[in-house]
Image (cartoon, rainbow, N blue to C red):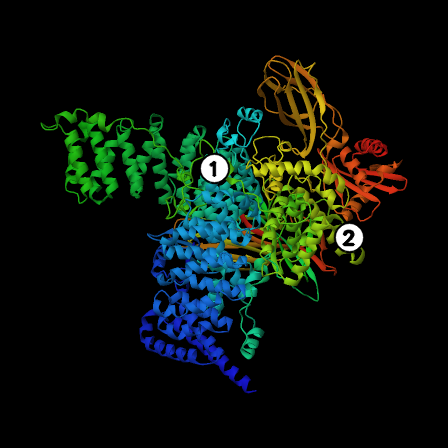
Amino acid sequence: MIHSLFLINTSGDLFLEKHWKSVISRSVCDYFFEAREKAVEPDNVPPVIPTPHHYLITIYREKIFFVSVIQTEVPPLFVIEFLHRVAETFQDYFGECSETTIKDNVVIVYELLEEMLDNGFPLATESNILKELIRPPTILRSMVNTITGSSNVGETLPTGQLSSIPWRRAGVKYTNNEAYFDVVEEIDAILDKSGTTVFAEIQGVIDACVKLSGMPDLTLSFMNPRLLDDVSFHPCVRYKRWESERVISFIPPDGNFQLMSYHISAQNLVAIPIYVKQNISFFETGSSGRLDITVGPKQTMGKTVECLVVTIHMPKVVLSANLNATQGTYNYDPVTKILLWDIGKLNPQKLPNLKGSLSLLSGAPKPEENPSLNIDLKIQQLAISGLKVNRLDMYGEKYKPFKGVKYVTKAGKFQVRT
Amino acid sequence: MSNNNVSYNEQVSLESGVDAAQENSSIPASVSGGLFSADYKKNEDLKEMLESNKDSQKLEAMKRIVGLIAKGKNASELFPAVVKNVASKNIELKKLVYVYLVRYAEEQQDLALLSISTFQRALKDPNQLIRASALRVLSSIRVPIIVPIMMLSIKEASTDLSPYVRKTAAHAIQKLYSLDPDQKEHLIEVIEKLLKDKSTLVAGSVVMAFEEVCPERIDLIHKNYRKLCNLLVDVEEWGQVVIIHMLTRYARTQFVSPWREDAVFDENSEKAFYDSEEERKVEQVKPYIMDPDHRLLLRNTKPLFQSRNTAVVMAVSQLYWHLAPKHELNIITKSLVRLLRSHREVQFIVLQNIATMSIQRKGMFEPFMKSFYVRSTDATHIKILKLEILTNLANEANISTILREFQTYVKSQDKAFAAATIQAIGRCATDISEVTDTCLNGLVLLLSNRDETVVAESVVVIKKLLQTQPSQHSDIIKHMAKLFDNITVSMARASILWLMGEYCEHVPKIAPDVLRKMAKTFTSEEDIVKLQTVNLAAKLYLTNSKQTKLLTQYILNLGKYDQNYDIRDRTRFIRQLIVPNEKSGALSKYARRILMAPKPAPVLQSAFKDRDRFQLGTLSHTLNSQAIGYLELSDWPAVAPDQSVRIVEVVEPVKETGAPVHGKSKPGKSSEKFYSDSEEEEEEEEEGSSSEDSSSSSEESESESESEENSDDSNKSSSSQSDSEKKKKTLKNKKLQQQKPDGKDRKQKNGNAVKGESRSESESASESSSSESSSESGSELDSDSDSDSGTDQKKNTRSKPVQSTLVTKVEKKEVSLLDLDDFSPAAVPSPKSSILSPSLLSDLQGLSISPTQSALQASSPVFVPETSHELLHRMTGKGLSAQYRFTRQPCIYGNSMVSLQLTLSNSSDQALENIHISEKSSTGQNIHRFNAIERLEPQASVTVSMGVDFNDSTQAANFQLCTKEDEFSVSIQPAVGELLLPITVSEADFSKEQGKLLGMNESSATITMTPENVSSQSVNRKVVSVANLGVIPSSQENIHRFAGKTVSSGCLVLVSVALKDPDAVITINTERTVMGSMLLRQLKTALTNSDP
């Protein structure tokens, strides 16, 4: 399976290598560098690169390339999913997954990689098991360790590893027992020039933060479970109960985790919270263009739209922008050609507007395509699909937990074509 | 205090170490040469630190060494210093030394041997983690000399009590195999042993080892096939992927294709399972029936579509794609489309697979077409794949939408993508003739685009399109000739030249002019353009030699001295061909026919057309070339291999004094309870307490097999369990087994009385589930669940022995028929072991996948009446007589059907042919007919099964029983009690549900019991003989409870009988009030009737 792993940053420095079988020379990465060069953008690097004797499977995340070396046939998604899991574990352990944190914690990283794979086959990827084997670094702990000489490494096999619920460890104890659920929905949409919806769907996740003592058995039910078109669950969820009763029944992992994700497809009508009136045009002569964008609320269900940001990838020939925003601030980066207009809260009484002129590279032909707008927004206290949690019941423990549900709607891949 | 000081110093040194390391890495490569000596020096002090006698110093040194390894720096000269610490007590230090050892042992083999004895010692350590990690390191040291030691350790570890160590052993197998392939035979033995392992932890790893070491030994899987299928949901995600891929391959070799409508089962393999001749006859006329094992696989993998792990979802999708009947494929779609939201790399792979699928089955993805719309922020390779899929999905109905979408893409700033879009338009134009002209016009418009790549691509595509119908499009050719001067992309220029030459007769004036221009620029053109110029010249020479003779000769002369040999060759060839001279007389006559032959239009097709030769989801599929170690997916066998190979031998039941029936099921269940550390129990409680219980049949079977597995574990006394508790529990078990009902009863009573509410709930819930599982564990365990409840022992011992002895006899005979009466369709070879029978039962239930599984936990009937009812008398049936009886089993043909067994006998003196049920059923019921019996010899009889959906009414089902000559109208009138299926719920849930069904839904009656009826056994017996109900263990002596659900609608039917000497109150709670009152009447008669 996975033979070796190389971590490479965006400037092409190989800063960590780990081999699970015999050592493979890092020169194998030359094939990757070649592909990297060809791709120009890091996003465009093909995930699977064949070389004469090996196959490289790569993911690009947090400005790091995780390049794994494979020698024989293996489902590529197996490797890709695992690499993402590695990145998530780093994030979980160090707060962020970046070159600096990995370099700073190289020993823990190495210990983790050692535990996660044996002979290239995943051994322990559940974060709660890993955390018992190798404790995450905290300032306090490193202080204590240096004083007492104790170590970060667990001495016994984590209880979860052998039980039928590997995601939860035994003997969890809290003084305040609480369970919070965040219903986060993202609208993926494409609107065309005239503002009609070409395509829209909702992607939702329920993130949970459960800090409950003992072995609680939770049941979460919805007011309108039929809305959910397609779901995927954390392994803790009992699928059969979902099938038969449309309730989510589970023994939760300890701490933060993603309980489920769901999909409300294009077949259902998706409410689009805002509309955008835009007019971007480039003149045939004079190397200039005009831009005029107005954003207004559409179907917001009476809630305020916050954190509204409009991002435009301008054509290469646009040199600078001289604009005037009635609300918020705008910024044009002439290197990346990205125009970013940070509006903030949408005020329905006074619609924000961005207007002005663009200057182009003189002599260059006018761009034939108008750039599309990417919208970012957030609506608190609203799940745009109308999904509502009905109740949360706990069995198996006697105490009364504190329960809370929060809804938030965000724009996912929300694009307005012009 | 001093201690503090020391540690402070250490901390400083740590920081400085990290600093130094960072400095090091940031120095450019060119300078690092100068630093080499410094490096060397640092290693010296590392050595010193390792020699020191403080663990903290050593640890510090090791951390820095690991840092060096991570950066790919050579630290091998420290080997002797490091290896000494292998036996360290500090576990972190030890781990780091292990990391080092594994990295460098191959280079320093002799020194590595020093550490071996430490590992051998550690392999005996009581701590399973230490045993496992010792084995991991030992097997990772790639030193050929220790192969025998490794082999020995693996063998030992494979029988370790800890499943974690056994898992490590499975991994070690692969390592040893790659180190020394000669060990294969021995390793296969270990794999065989581990494949039998029932722990979910081991399953994935050992299958991985199997795939690596001996994928060709498919025979090793047979016996474990069903177990793997049942365990699959509980295996960790990575193991699931590997197992699913392996099972896909396995299934392709073992089952016949479900894709043919007329597939007929291989008779030979069937024969062994049916002892009665009649059964076989029934089989012969059967159309394709999926092997139950095949169905088992599909059913048990289905929940994994909901996995959060994309690799698992992909694996199940490919399994369905390669194994499922075509009409079941649609469930793949949603899950795959969901994956498109995942990371870019995941999208890439998933889109590739969808592209391959969408070529073969457009319909699957068409409703989700919009999910493949391209966003400007997608990466280029993602965009191109989406485009590919959109093109594949295009048809007459959606083409206008797709083309509108393409129009946006053509304008994209990403030019590679715009070019791909143009090709896609070309493909749509050839595929769908309605839009060919529209597309062509659109493409011509693009010719005036400012971007060169767009224009060039359009020219190329137009060329291909024009070939289909050139005569109508001379305008376009002229237009392109005009554009020729402005186009610089060689491929486009070459295409135009080719077009000119090919259709020079349509543009007689322009073509020579183009040639004239080309003659001027010939030398500065690209090779591909030159070749086409030569072609054009030759073609014009043949058609219009007057105008172009000189030009042609000029070009041929230029070509003769070209630098490229291809062009020189072509020139020479053309000259000989077209210019008549003495030597080449023969061929030049045909020059015109050679050069101007009508050429077939090119077929524009998907790049994914031929990818389906690879198994989906594999690396080979992604690369479109066979990767090393790719295992070919075989074609379906024409004839299914012997399926008896998958039948597992009976597991020797645990010895005990009580009835053997209990021995098989009880220890398993109760050991599970303690084995899984109360989580399991909680789960059970959860399931039990909510009474609308989800766990449908298949889950049941899983938990069943698991419990079996656990019982094995517990027999081996797994070290993870706390011993004292275990003893207590096993003691309890034994007690339970010996004095089964009473002990259980008492225990439960205690539970209710002493413990708090929740506790008692859990008690009773687990109680109920255990009782239900025991009743599930095999149809031969007929009246098992009532013995649990502490009643009806007499009946148990009376009705049981007959059947169970029969069964045991049969088992001895190696033939697997449990109770063919119960599972009458003979297509199913019933496994004989007690482990598998419950899962088999659920398999049968699952054969008909119903969208909503009933929430209630069905259990097997408590009592199956032997009485059969007459359907057709032999007098009226002209020799054919028929009797039916209710089997009280869940019907395999449909969840809402009542299962019936029909015995047909021929009492005439000639054979009856073609006995069947006529297609038209007179009443509205849905009837599943038995397959026609071709021939019934005189005095012979045959038993067949059928299913009738009575719709929860006692209305008779009327139908025609036909022979070749005659038709007889018959009708089956079900008693209300036969329209039920027993379920198990806990007592608490029973009361809860009862509370919900009050008022109109309750009917009750007071009766006077005859004295001989008051014993609890007789009450139970009476009730279950009237109605197919499950007995609920009751904590009160004088109240008896029964629960069932209606077959068709699944409504609860709760019956309780409260004895108040000499009276008794029968209460029935059900939503089906009519059924309730009918049942009440029947129970009344049954309980007041005094006959025993």
Residue B54 at x, y = what percent? 48, 80
Residue B578, above or below B221: above
Residue B723, above or below B1066: below
Residue B171 at x, y = what percent? 46, 56
Q: Residue at x 46, y 47 (%)?
A: B349
Asked where in the image residue B1031 lies, by quadrant, the reply is top right
Residue A65, above or below B737: below
**Callout 1: residue from which chain?**
B
Q: What type is the residue that disc 2 sits on? A: Arg
Task: In the rendered structure, find residue B746 and report the number of the disc placed on it.
Answer: 2
Q: Residue at x 21, y 26 (%)?
A: B592
**SS state under label 1:** helix
Q: How many other residues sit within 10 Å of disc 1, few (<14), some (14-19) or many (≥20)?
A: many
**Callout 2: residue from which chain?**
B
Q: Is residue B543 visible?
A: no
Image quadrant in which the N terminus of chain B is located:
bottom right
Left or right: residue B249 compared with residue B1080: left
Asked where in the image residue B16 lies, by quadrant, the reply is bottom left
Q: Is residue A184 visible?
A: yes
**SS state under label 2:** helix
Q: Earlier in the sequence, mark 2 or mark 1?
A: 1
Q: How many marks?
A: 2
In this view, the residue in front, B771 or B48, is: B771
Left or right: residue B930 compared with residue B1049: left
Left or right: residue B326 compared with residue B660: left
Left or right: residue B521 compared with residue A257: left
2 or 1: mark nearer the eye: 2
Q: CA distance from mark 2 to mark 1?
A: 50 Å
Tag 1 residue:
B254
